[in-house]
Amino acid sequence: MTVIAFRRPRPARPVNWCASCGQDFTSLEYFDRHRVGEHGLDWPEHENGRRCLDIDELGASGFRRDDAGHWFDPARAQRASYALGGSTDRPAKGRNGERKAAA
């Protein structure tokens, strides 16, 4: 098994934690998007093998971290808020119901 340098310890309250890279995601969709490559091929032995996006690749793909350190996609979250009837010009509510400041 290859140890990845950016692996983080398991968070106290994981949401969608990856045992391979140690990153945590706000949804299963975002977790799935951070895994790339062909199933059945190991990376780095195979260039197109299954692996996790690294920190730089996550940022380049539009992912950001929330206040709890979970990765999410702000553009996708905004589209979902709009689709569900929420306003796109105000921040989403946090777990405790308070509005989070825009980043």
Image (spheres, rainbow, N blue to C red):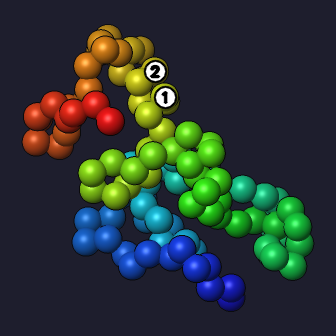
Vertical comparison of 62 with 49: above or below: above
Q: Mark 2 is on which residue type?
A: Arg
Q: Residue at x 57, y 60 (%)?
A: 55
Name the element at disc 1. helix
Locate residue 78: give its quadrant.
Answer: top left
Q: Quadrant of the N terminus?
A: bottom right
Nearer-the-camera pick, 103 or 98: 103
Whether residue 19 can be seen here: no
The residue beneath circle 2 is: 79
In the image: residue 45, left or right of residue 10: right
Name the spot of residue 40 as percent of width and height, x first. 82, 69
Judge depth for marks 2 and 1 and give the one in front.
1
Under mark 1, the amino acid is Ala
**Side (left or right) of 57 relative to 25:** right
Do the numbered discs 2 and 1 sit on residues whose CB atoms are within 8 Å?
yes
Q: CA distance from mark 2 to mark 1?
A: 6 Å
Q: How many numbered dots are placed on residues in this image? A: 2
Instruction: State the residue in front, 7 or 14.
Output: 7
Residue 85 quadrant: top left
Q: Residue at x 62, y 45 (%)?
A: 60
Q: Point out residue 9 in the picture as x, y percentages from the top left corner.
A: 39, 79
Name the residue that disc number 1 marks: 75
Pointer 2 local density, CA inside 10 Å: few below 14, some 14–19, many at least 20: some
Tell me where residue 91 appears, x and y as whole percent. Answer: 26, 26
